[in-house]
Amino acid sequence: MVAARVARAARRAGLAVAGCGGDAESAGELLAGRARLPEPFTVPLPIPEVARPVRPGRYEVTQRVAAVEILPGLRTEVWGYGGTFPGPTFELRRGTPAVLRVRNELPVPTSTHLHGGVNPPGSDGYPTDLVVPAGHAAPHGHPGEVHHPVVKDYRYPVEQRAATLWYHDHRMDFTAPQVWRGLAGMVLVRDEEEDALPLPRGERELPLMICDRSFEEDGSFRYPQAHGGHGHSHARDPDFMEGVEGDVILVNGAPWPVAEVTATRHRLRLVNASNARRYRLRLSPGGRFTQVGSDAGLLAAPVAHDTITMAPGERFDVVVDFSAYPPGSTVTLLNTLAGGPAGNVMRFVVTRRAPDDTAVPAVLSRPPGRPRPVAARTFDFRRTDESWTINGHRYRPGVPLARPRLGTAEVWRLTSDFHHPVHLHLAHFQVLARNGRPPAATDAGWKDTVDVRPYEVVDVLARFDGHRGRYMLHCHNLEHEDMAMMADFDVI
Ligand SMILES: [Cu+2]
């Protein structure tokens, strides 16, 4: 297993660079599965269906239970948007508002968050703004909880730049188990600035939603029962306080898939949709990722990476030039943060040479510049007793920790005791510094999620644009999020 050996070697190198021993890069606890697993790189890469509007600007999707084949020969019950996992991909255009009607036919309430979206607060997917299925009684009694019976219309102005976004469940206390069961999908915002670029498109643009899961022997998802495995329990399993990592890596819902590509440039829209797992992506037998976009849109100029470290919630929009490999060869996407099966992600088989009129121009876009900050605040992400807290507080819905003014920018200092991928709703930000030093190459551009590592001090410059109202910041390790590592901020 050359790939595994490379992965182990790279993992050791990565740990050495980090200057820490043991599992310093591991952000969760491994939950070993019990199912018989396929050989890696045997299942074809699926591409999620692109959602079609029921009429211009209007989409409808039903959250429902479905049985799908994820592991060959076994059936897995998923809770999916449209009954699929991932859900359909929504392709939206800047300047064309969209209404998404979500119908909930699941046995549990839901709240759908468009991650990276600049949307009004009533359509942001606040954790207690719930779509409640028919026949579901008994409110939980969280302060300010809102119940929409069966359907809710989410209104997306789509005034933001072209970007790789994703949508997922955000229900109070149960985000982690409900996303684990399948409630996630991708959104691609497009605009004229992107249209004008000669980037790969069509079949040469691949949305790749990466996440890890574990399976029971019968093919059903395995998840710690005490973490809300049935969607009804608030009890937590202290063994999984750090977060749940699966032992099967899925791309677009398929285990370690394989995709055929021509020996041309391809654009890969990478999303880390895992509950807790971080990845360090590397191409084997070598090769480079040319990053063209970050969480919130196109970069001003491309950035080349040998490896990309992705925390949960982050996106990387990259171009890989497969003409660098001989036709007939294979290119494996590795995760060098893990040994064993989780050290593989997927494989590309380079089929043949083909004409390629694409390019990655030296200038990609004109993103907004850095505004001058008007305030500075600190948010400390830390374990306090048996909870994950921000500034010492468990989440208190309706009690904002900050009240930034619309149209201003602030420097937010994020400090931590562990791996906490910090996500801001509404506000996009730039990373200014890590531990007082320049940010990582992978921190480039406007972002909405940042990988904050143990005992790091990360300074970000956040813009509060678009809408007034109640939003939130939280850890995007979904088990941490459910264990109260969230806070409100009000844009005033
Ligand atoms: Cu966290």
Image (tube, rainbow, N blue to C red):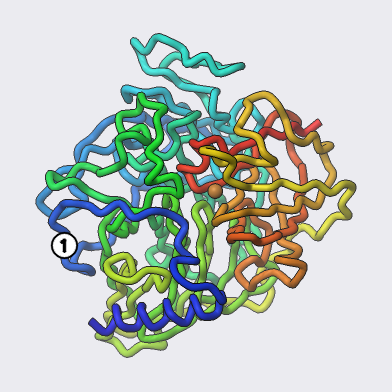
Q: Nearer the viewer, residue 43 or 260?
A: 43
* Neighbours of disc 1 within 10 Å: few (<14), some (14-19), many (20+): some
> Where the C terminus falls, by quadrant?
top right
Is there any visible trace of residue 191 in the rendered image? Answer: no
The quadrant holding residue 256 is bottom left
Q: Is residue 397 above or below residue 368?
A: above
- Does dot 1 land on a helix, a strand or a loop? loop
Indicate the position of residue 266 as horizontal and vertical percent values: 43, 72
Q: Is mark 1 within 8 Å of ligand 1?
A: no
Residue 314 can be seen, yes or no: yes
Residue 125: horizontal and vertical position, in percent?
55, 31
Image quarter of residue 79: top left
Residue drawn 35% across and 83% down? 6
Q: Is residue 53 left or right of residue 5?
A: right
Residue 192, percent across and down?
63, 57
Quadrant of the rendered image containing residue 333: bottom left
Residue drawn at x 81%, y 59% is: 370
Residue under pointer 1: 38
Residue in the picture at 54% in, 29% down: 127
Please identify the quadrant where the N terminus is shown. bottom left
Front position in the image: 291 or 223: 223
Of all residues, the one furthest to the left in this rendering is: 73
Residue 336, relative to residue 155: is it above or below? below
Q: Amino acid at mark 1?
A: Pro
Residue at 70% x, 60% y is 457
With respect to residue 454, does 97 lie above or below? Answer: above
Q: Residue furthest front?
A: 385
Give the x, y percent position of residue 491: 77, 34
In-front residue for pair 109/103: 109
